[in-house]
Each structure stands twice: as C-alpha cells, then as structure tokens.
Image (tube, grey):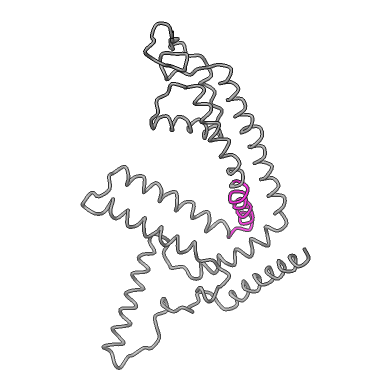
Amino acid sequence: MRKKYKAKAFVLKILEIIVMFVFVTLYIIGRLLPVTLIDSYSTRVILCLGLLYFYYRIIYIYLPISPTLGPLLYRVKLMVLVDFINFMRMTILVIISGGIVIHAAMYPDYPFNKELFRRTFHKAWFSLFLTPISDLSDEVSCTLYNKTNNNSLCKAGEYVDWKCPSVGLWSYIFNIQYFVLLKLILLTLLYALFSATASKLSTESDAIWKFQRYHLVVDFSNRLRLPAPLNIISYIIILLELFKWMLRRIFCCTCKDPNLPVALKSDGRRFSIKDYTYWNQLAQEYDANQQSKEMEQ
C-alpha cells in the first residue's frame, strides 16, 4: 500500500495501530483477566480515554465524507493545529507568570507543597474560561495577625491563617493586569486569527477537501471489514486463511493453489479501477494547480 500511494502519510496509521494494541491489552488485563493487575479506578480511566478516542476518531473518519462538513472540518483543523497552537505559545508565558505572581502576592505564607502548585495553576489555567475573583473579597472569619504579640513567628501576610488571602493594592494590580492581557488582548487575538483563517480558506477549502477525500477513499478501500477495536477478529480470520492456504500447499498435492487468499494480496482492490482512476486524476489536477500557483508566486 505504501508503494501504491506514495503521497499518503502512514505515520498516523502506525500510531493508531499502536494505540489500539495498547488499549486492547490494557482492557484485557484490567477487565477480563481474573488476576487484578490494575486497580478499578485506573481501569475506569482507561475506558474513559478509550471512549474519548473512539468518538473523536469517528469525527475524523466520517465527517470528511460530507460536502458540507468536510471543508468545515478542514478549517477547524487548521484553526486548532496552527492558530490555537500559536495562541498558546504566546499565552503560556502569561499564564505561568500570572499564576505565580498572583498566588505569591495573595497567599504569601502558603506552605511549599503539592497543593501550592495545584492552587497556583488552577486559577491561572481556568481563567481562560472563567473570571475567578472570589479571592479578592474580604473573609469575615480571618483574624488579623499582630506581630507585637508573637515574635517567634515570621509571617509575610496580614492574617493568622495562611489560607486567608491578603487583599491589597498589589493583589488588585496583579489580578487586573493578568485579566486585561488574557481576556481583552490575547483572547481577542485568538478570535481574530480564527476569523482570518476562515475567510482565507473559504475559496480553497472545497478543492482541498476533495483532495483529502481521495485519501479517505483509499483508506476505506484498504480497511478491514470490522471497525476498531473489533478488527482484531479480521486479523484472526486472515491468519486462519493463511494457515489454511499453507496446509493446502503442503498436504494437498492435487489441489495446489499458487494464489494467495484475497485478504493477503497486496494489490487486492475493493473498488473498480475507474474509481481509483477518478480520484487519482482529481488529486493530480489539484497538485498541478498548486504547483502552478507556487510558480506564479
């Protein structure tokens, strides 16, 4: 298949096979074997990951067939892989620095442990979706710390309990600059990038979708009968057919069949030659148009 379709990338197919094999192996170990090698919660997490993977995989496999959703899916793919990645490269510095600065200013006496890292980046990351400002409100139950009464402790905050936020001028300044950069500037820039990508590809997305649908047709023509992860049954059937063919070649002298089974032939086609010719011609026309555009530029 690699020799027949040189323009088709097979790296993702290899990764998909590896992911399928790992998932089936972990499922058998966690759910079918009588010996408990993986705890129940880890097994449930594996099943959740498998469910997400297979549902998202359906989006990638079946939506490109639609003439309406196919070009739309291509634009969304570029928005995620190009625009959103570039957005996160700019935003990650603001998120990390803002999370550390805000938590250090509002909770100066917080102990250095795992909970410190969780609280620091929890507010910073979820600020992409929410605007958490509840920490800026004064806590009624917090007691002010009097430095003259206890000289054995060295506290940087204003309260006895280190869980109480120190709300002051610098806390407001750090929060305001963080939300202005994140909410008003960077998120607005992300929407502008999405809009520019959608408008730029509105005329070319249909032709690109047709070219990608050719790859999808080639993929479906070489797929097994059953979908993943049930395709292991098809592999077992192929091995049985190969074993049967080998037995006939060895023991049955009168009925030797030099031809391999259909499932094992490298050039076996499930579509007619006209279908392959049509999609191949369409891909060549698209490639010729792209080369002419590059030469003009």
Could you say where residue 152 lies in the image, as x and y percent from the top left? 36, 13
- Tell me which residue sits at (58%, 60%) in the image: 65
Instruction: Depth check: give the residue in front, 280 or 290.
Output: 290
**Apparent side of residue 96 relative to residue 176 in the rendered image (left or right):** left
- In this rendering, the answer to whether 37 lies above or below 12 is above
Region in magenta: 65-84
In the displayed image of the protein, which residue is found farthest to the front? Answer: 151
Is residue 178 inside the magenta stretch?
no
Q: Main secondary structure of the magenta part?
A: helix
**Apparent side of residue 202 relative to residue 15 in the rendered image (left or right):** right
In the displayed image of the protein, which residue is found farthest to the right? Answer: 296
Could you tell me which quadrant the C terminus lies in? bottom right
Is residue 81 inside the magenta stretch?
yes
Could you say where residue 70 lies in the image, as x and y percent from the top left? 61, 57
- Tell me which residue sits at (38%, 30%) in the image: 113
Could you say where residue 50 lies in the image, as x and y percent from the top left? 40, 51
Could you say where residue 83 lies in the image, as x and y percent from the top left? 63, 47
Residue 178 picture quarter: top right
Instruction: Depth check: give the residue in front, 156 or 99.
Output: 156
In the displayed image of the protein, which residue is found farthest to the left? Answer: 35
- In this rendering, the answer to whether 280 lies above or below 138 is below
**Apparent side of residue 280 relative to residue 219 in the rendered image (left or right):** right
- In this rendering, the answer to whether 255 lies above or below 237 is below
Instruction: Depth check: give the residue in front, 230 or 110.
Output: 110
- In this rendering, the answer to whether 55 lies above or below 237 is above
